[in-house]
Structure formats: C-alpha cells, structure tokens
Amino acid sequence: MKKKLYFILLIPIFLVCFSCENDKIKPGFTKDNHTSKNINHPKYTTLVEKKEVTQTYEAVGTIRPLTESVIESQISAQVIKISCVPGMGVKKGQLLISLDARRLSTQLKQAQEGLAIAKKRQAQAQKSIEETKAGLDQSLATYNRSNKLFSAGVVSSQKLEIDKSAYLQAKARLEKSKESKQAITASIRQAQEVVKEARIAKEYSRIVSPSNGVVVKRMIDPGDLAVPGKPLLIIQTSGALRLEANIREGLISQIVLGKDYQVKIKTIDKTVLSKIEEIVPYADPTTRTFLVKASLPLTPGIYPGMFGRLLIPVKKDQTLLIPAKAVILVGQLELVYVKKEDSWQSVYIKTGKKFNEKIEVLAGLVGNETIGYKE
C-alpha cells in the first residue's frame, strides 16, 4: 500500500519537472510554431546584417585637467580666510587664501626701524666727515704756513713738527670717519635686504592665483596650519582635459603616439575622439600596466575626476547586427520577430555589444533573415 502511495505522489512531481524542462528557452528556439498575433503587419523590416566589426579593449582611466597648478604656502602660518570654493573661476593675481601675518608684520616693522637707525648713523657719519675735513683743511694750512716760515728762519723746527703732527692726526681722523661711513653704508644695505625679505614674507601671507583658471579642489580649512610643501588648492589653469588610462603590458605595443582613439564616458553616455599625447615608458610593477595620457575635446558635462574608458582596437570579427529597436524584452529574455514564409514568428536570441543604433547578435540567428518591428 505504501509503495503505491509513493508512486502516486511522484507522478505530479515528474509532470512538473517535465513541464519546467519544456519551458526552458534557448537562443533560436521558437516557443510557438503558430503565427504571432502581435506583429501581423510590421512597420519596419530589415535583413540580419553580417558585418566585420572591430573588437575593442576598454582601458579604465580618470579624466584630469591638461594643465593644473598645485597651490602651496611659502611660509608656516595659520589659515585665516579662504576666498574661493571648488568650481569657482579665478583670475591671475586674485586673492585665494589669507594667512596670519601678525608675526610677519612685527618682523617687517623691526627691520624698518633697524634701517631707519642705520640711515641716521650714516647721516651722523657724513657730518663727522665734513667736520673732520674742515679741521684737516685748517691744520694743512697751518702746517704749510709754518713750513714757509721755517724756511725763512722765522719759526723753530719744534713749531713745524707740532703743526705737522696736527695735520697728520686730522688726516687720520678723516680716513677713520670715511671707513666708519663705509661700514654704516654696508649695514644700510643689509638692513634694506632684511626689510625686503620681511616685506616678501608678509606678501606670502596673501596667497594669490598664479594664472586664470578654475578651482577644482580644496585641501585646507580656516584655522588649519599651512606649511611649505603641503598642498592647499588645485587650480585647473586651462579648460582642456585629458584621460589618464592604465594599459596592460600586452597591449601597449598597439598604442601609437599621436593617433586618435575613442573614449567612452558612461556618466554622460557619450563617446568622444581623443589623441594620444604621452606614453609613460615605465610599467607599474604592481599592476603590470602603462600610463597613457590622451587629450579630450571640449565637451559639456565632462569634469576632472570623472570615469572614462579608452577604447583600443584589438581584432576584427564577423558578427551579426540588427537594429536595437527590433529586440523585445520578455522578462530577462530577448526575442525578435523573424519572417517564416508568409508569417512572422518570435525567435529568442542572445545579444552582445551595441554599435550605435545597432546591436550584436551572439546566438539565435544565422544571418540574412528578415526581421520586423513596429518602432
């Protein structure tokens, strides 16, 4: 009795499995052999096209500015104010970041005071030279008069020696005054350099744009400490962009410098033409790829940092192409209507890559069939 019951229970399970097996659709299989009622009069008809297409390798890359400037600080100071935001256009010389300049202002003031003191000493030295020169002229005149009188036997040799000594001392004082003035003049030049350096250092507290461009990235906030060598901003200094892609080492020989290649930007659903401008002759030992840089045309909607793919032709294959509009989706399955004698029948297919308005057929058709579609 139990064996009969088991057999009775297995019959519907077997029927379900058999039914499910028959419902599996394979590419090219026609589910119903009768004429389709959905497309008795197709609006458009076309032949399944056999065509040679180029298979491509898609190298992943990132869009970057063709030229950009990394803005860094020349001094160590706290950031007081940032006068720009990413996406903002800036002009050459425009103020971007203000740093704390109080310490630099104090240094400049001290340097200016030192210069003023040096100039005052220079004036005093010049006055001393003039006074010493006047004394020298007087002592020289006295010495010359004594020398004449001594020759005439009017004055003694002792008087002549005293006047000569006074003249030589006055001359020595003049030379010393001139040397002092030269030292003061040298100190003035040094003080002027200190003032110049202090003024330049203070100017460094105002970070300005080196050229016209657009701010694309900011890496600092007010209150942070800016130090030399630490990037603060990145400015795109030209509107041109390029794609930097990594090409596997097996394909690098197929990349030609100066040749045009297509770049696919999925975000905006566009494919643009690019030109290879640079091939870095060094393979990354980790990824075994080469860095290739390709310039991009000015295209609305493309921004630095976006994702792109460099399409590299690899080989040519024969394939079947049909209009993408002719493919009908039924759940996860794809079908087309194929003309069989005087009727239209649905045929399940498997598609591949899209080529503009056409799509590749991998299975289900053999070529030269007539297919129909309404839109």
Image: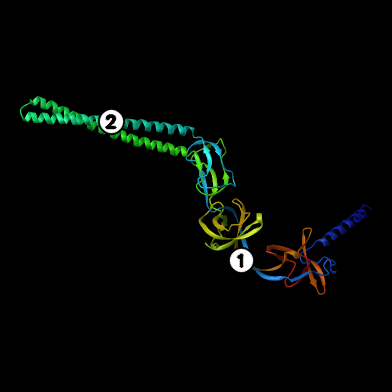
Residue hosting label 2 = 127
Residue 346 picture location, percent across and down: 80, 67
Q: Which one is nearer the viewer's eye here, 101 or 133? A: 133
| x, y percent for residue 294 | 55, 58
Q: For marks 1 and 2, give the CA distance.
A: 92 Å
Q: Crowding near pointer 2: few (<14 within 10 Å), some, many (20+)?
A: few
In front: 285, or 211?
211
Q: Nearer the viewer, residue 374 or 327?
A: 374
Q: Amino acid at mark 1?
A: Lys
Q: Position of residue 313 (x, y in %)?
A: 60, 64
- Quadrant holding the C terminus: bottom right
Closer to the camera: disc 1 or disc 2?
2
Residue 72 sits above or below residue 340 on the image: above
Which residue carries the number 1 mark? 315
Q: Quadrant of residue 369?
A: bottom right
Residue 333 seen by the camera: yes
**Quick check: 48 above or below 228?**
below
Mark 1 or mark 2: whose residue is earlier in sequence: 2
